[in-house]
Image (cartoon, rainbow, N blue to C red):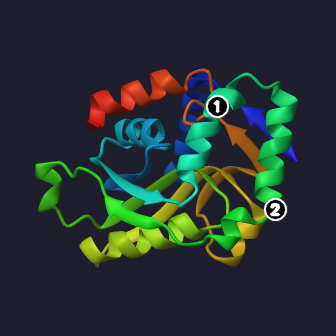
């Protein structure tokens, strides 16, 4: 399985590439990012399309374990990290635990009364499709008339059983970036998130 480790600079470059793909077919009037991992993507896409940005959370039950293991993972060689990520994906952990706890983050006051018609939902990677599927359900509760499109840097083939991601760059790549708990840039990434959206 292919593995890409992105720096903040490279992640921004990939986000711009994704925006170019989206722009050919879609002009959103709002961007919703899956927090916290896709917050930089969400902000950058919001700026590129000049639209409001909202956050939504979709938490898995085993997320806490990954956070606890992060300090150890940071010191492992890239090849070993790639192998561990491939094992996590291939062992079906995400498929066995499809449910997410989905809830809105802070929604800017000026966005509360806007009836968005074209919403772009973004995440760094679509592994099983469960996060997108469940987030779409939550978005529809608040914006029932909106057309919702999805975008990610990477899409795994297995996710197509649950959902068709509308815009993406890579297929079946393991993507590691500043949003990953084991990234050397993760602390700065979270600090940036807290500045923008609060703890």
* Dot 1: element: loop
Residue at coordinates 83% horizontally, 60% vertically from top-left?
90
Q: Which residue is mark 2?
A: 91
Query: In the image, residue 119 lies at what x, y percent?
Result: 37, 61
Residue 169 left/right relative to 64: right
Residue 187 left/right relative to 145: right
Query: In the image, residue 21 lies at what x, y percent?
Result: 59, 48
Which of the 4 quarters of the picture holds residue 42?
Answer: top left
For label 2, the crowd category at 10 Å Cα-Cα, with few meaning under 14, some 14 to 19 and many 20 or more, is few
Residue at coordinates 34% horizontally, 69% vertically from top-left?
139
The answer to whether residue 73 shows anywhere in this view is: yes
Residue at coordinates 87% horizontally, 31% vertically from top-left?
79
Q: Is residue 150 above or below residue 80?
A: below
For label 1, the crowd category at 10 Å Cα-Cα, with few meaning under 14, some 14 to 19 and many 20 or more, is many
Query: In the image, residue 5 lies at what x, y percent?
Result: 72, 30
Disc number placed over residue 182 in the picture, else none: 1
């Amino acid at each position: 399985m292919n593995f890409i480790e992105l720096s903040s600079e490279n992640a921004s470059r990939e986000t711009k590439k994704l925006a170019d793909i989206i722009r050919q077919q879609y002009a959103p009037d709002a961007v919703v990012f899956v927090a916290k991992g896709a917050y930089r993507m969400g902000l950058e896409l919001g700026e590129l399309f000049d639209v409001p940005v909202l956050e939504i959370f979709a938490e898995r039950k085993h997320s806490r374990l990954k956070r606890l293991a992060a300090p150890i993972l940071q010191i492992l060689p890239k090849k070993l990290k790639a192998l561990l990520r491939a094992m996590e994906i291939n062992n079906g952990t995400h498929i066995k635990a499809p449910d997410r706890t989905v809830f809105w983050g802070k929604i800017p006051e000026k966005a509360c009364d806007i009836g968005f018609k074209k919403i772009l939902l973004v995440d760094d990677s679509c592994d099983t499709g469960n996060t997108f599927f469940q987030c779409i359900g939550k978005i529809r509760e608040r914006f029932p008339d909106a057309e919702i499109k999805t975008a990610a840097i990477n899409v795994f083939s297995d996710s197509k059983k649950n959902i068709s991601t509308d815009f993406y760059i890579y297929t079946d790549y393991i993507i590691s970036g500043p949003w990953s708990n084991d990234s050397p840039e993760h602390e700065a990434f979270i600090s940036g998130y807290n500045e923008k959206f609060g703890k």
